[in-house]
Amino acid sequence: MAIDRSYRLVPGTTIFDAEQSARGYHLNQFCMSLMTAENRAAYLADERGYLDAWPLREEQRRALLDRDLNAAMREGGNIYFLAKWGATLGFSFQQMAGSMTGMTEQEYRDMMVAGGRSATAPASRIDHAVLEAAHAADTPPAEHAAVSAAVFTSHVPAIGAAMDHGKTDEPYWQPVFAGYEPSRRWAAAHVPDVVVLVYNDHASAFDLSLIPTFVLGTGAAYPTADEGYGPRPVPGVEGDPELAAHLAHCLIQDDFDLTLANEMPVDHGLTVPLSLMFGEVEKWPCKVIPLHVNVVQYPVPSGARCFELGRALRRAVESYPRPLDVQVWGTGGMSHQLQGPRAGLINREWDNAFLDRLVTDPAGLARVPHLEYVEEAGSEGIELVMWLIARGALSDVDDGGTVDVEHRFYHVPASNTAVGHLILTNQHPQPTEEN
Ligand code: DHB
Ligand code: FE
């Protein structure tokens, strides 16, 4: 089923969606720059020169210089952003809105005073024949993306540091990296088009000014965060804005109220798993869509919510009309506590039961409450809820089919943490006669 964009059929109306946002990204960010008195003065002193310093299309510059807001809307502008530009030039919202209607300022004002434009006038309404034709044309795509595997791994920053400083052969680290040798071979032979990489930001991109629960990266690229010791010497990450916008659209329509990030640095939670799986490379071999989960400040999402998000993620991937190979990675864990007198907690039995149940009983595992994670796996063991997103994205959960355990590894310690790792491949159900 294609995604529902019937909102485009409302006459005289431009709905600001991900496509419009991409079209108008720099135009809207230019508008935001006018939120300081200094920049407003610079703009008013030399409009053309100021606009030329922004990577705008000529149509966008022209729209602003001509004060043509309909053209600015076509070019991806959003009225709340454009309002900053309008305010700089002394236009009110009413003047801006009226300027798009073909009426004079006075005529528009008079219409508003008389009760506003009629919502029932034919010119304000959708043509239902067009709407029905659009629904009739909405058939499942002939080809589509699919989730081929899920990878689960700890993301301990010290593992990245061991790689970055050439310590992987030291006796302390050797067993950790030996456990990932089969994974490296598997990863090299199964490079997907895109990894949806579920991780938590560790107070790197998000500080206490903003605490979103789920953040999907819809950007083209993500730089490596400086976590206090300089950015890791690993490549930046290339995103897949088109697939990410599709996932965002589907997941939000499926009632997962994601935050979307077009720009964000990515920290060890995302880069260490890439290093573990792909080794030292000049460029990561595939695109990555970051999916951040807040596990820093409570309340954090439940395992059950994460598992449901994974299930919805698979549906969203499978509705993307291109034959992309997608892997979903869940990172963090296993048992670890980084704080207080209880720091250093490790629970081998609980961790291994978690790995067992992740394979054989994911729906039951998803019902484990937060308190159990904290008590049994330590305060930072809560990161394991993120693994349930990757697990929920495999077909056996909903559609039949099976999962194969490609590799399993467990080792204590890496820094303060029990390292756990699983690779599950998705054996899709065989198509039946009816489908
Ligand atoms: C450690 C583990 C983590 O998952 C993390 O985010 C930071 C530190 C550690 O064991 O040192
Ligand atoms: Fe972590």
Image (cartoon, grey):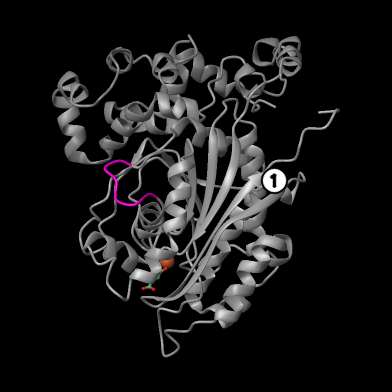
- Expressed as whole percent of the image width and height from the top left, the position of residue 100 reads 46, 15
Of the four image quadrants, the one with ligand 2 is bottom left
Q: At 15% across and 31% down in the image, what residue appears?
A: 42
Q: Is residue 103 above or below residue 305?
A: above
Query: Is 409 drawn above or below residue 57 in the view shown?
Result: below
Residue 268 is situated, as x and y percent measured from the top left of the image, at 35, 59
The residue located at (47%, 64%) in the rendering is 332
Quadrant for the C terminus, please. Answer: top right
Residue to which mark 1 is pinned:
395
Q: Is residue 356 one of those drawn in magenta?
A: no
Question: Residue 343, relative to residue 60: is it above or below?
Answer: below
Residue drawn at 48 percent across, 48 percent down: 186
User: Residue 277's x, y, as percent?
Assistant: 41, 53
Most common secondary structure along the magenta stretch: loop
Disc 1 residue type (three-letter): Ser
When asked about the image quadrant of residue 208, the answer is bottom left
State which region is magenta: 278-283
Q: Report whether 403 appears left or right of 208.
A: right
